[in-house]
Image (spheres, grey):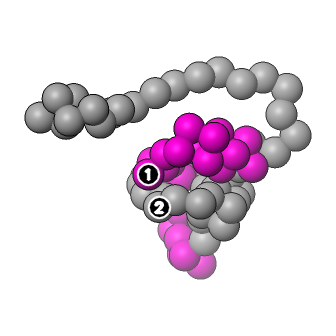
Amino acid sequence: MAAEDGVKIASAETILDVASVADTIANYASKERADLIVIGTKGKTGIKKSLLGNVASGVVTHAHCLVLVTR
C-alpha cells in the first residue's frame, strides 16, 4: 500500500490574502515537494473547449511538477 511506503496521499491547507491563485498553488506544491497537482476546470463548449480556465492554465504554466487537469 502507498501509505506503508510513506506516500503522502493528499493534503489541504487554506491560504488567505493571495495576489495570484495560480502562483500560490504552484509555489505551495513546490514548497511541499509535490509530485502531482490535480486541478479542476469548467467544461466549455465550442472554441472555449480548447482553452483552460485562468487558474488551471496558470498552474500548468508555473508548476514544477505534473499537473492533471480534469472537469
Question: Which quarter of the figure has residue 28?
Answer: top right
Q: Say which residue label 2 marks.
A: 66
Q: Say which residue label 1 marks.
A: 35
Q: Is residue 40 visible?
A: no
The residue at 17%/29% (across/down) is 4
- Element under label 1? loop
Q: Which of the marked residues, 2 or 1, is nearer the chain's N terminus?
A: 1
Asked if disc 2 and disc 1 are in contact, CB closer than 8 Å, the reply is yes
- Verify whether residue 48 appears in magenta: yes
50 to 44, vertically: above or below: below
Label 2, label 1: how far apart the Cα atoms are: 6 Å
- Relative to the observer, which residue lies in front, 16 or 70? 16
Q: Of discs 2 and 1, which sits in the foreground?
A: 1
For the N terminus, the quadrant is top left
The residue at 35%/32% (across/down) is 8
Q: Please give left or right for residue 22 compared with residue 20 in the image.
A: left
The residue at 52%/59% (across/down) is 65
Where residue 39 sits: x, y (%)? 50, 48
Where residue 48 sits: x, y (%)? 60, 71
Where residue 55 sits: x, y (%)? 68, 52
Q: Which residues are magenta?
A: 23-50
- Verify whether residue 31 appears in magenta: yes
Where residue 32 sits: x, y (%)? 56, 38
User: Is disc 2 surrounded by few (<14), some (14 to 19) or many (20+) residues within 10 Å?
Assistant: few
Q: What is the residue that sits farthest to the front in this orientation?
A: 5
Amino acid residing under circle 1: Asp
Amino acid residing under circle 2: Leu
Q: Please give left or right for residue 68 compared with residue 62 in the image.
A: left
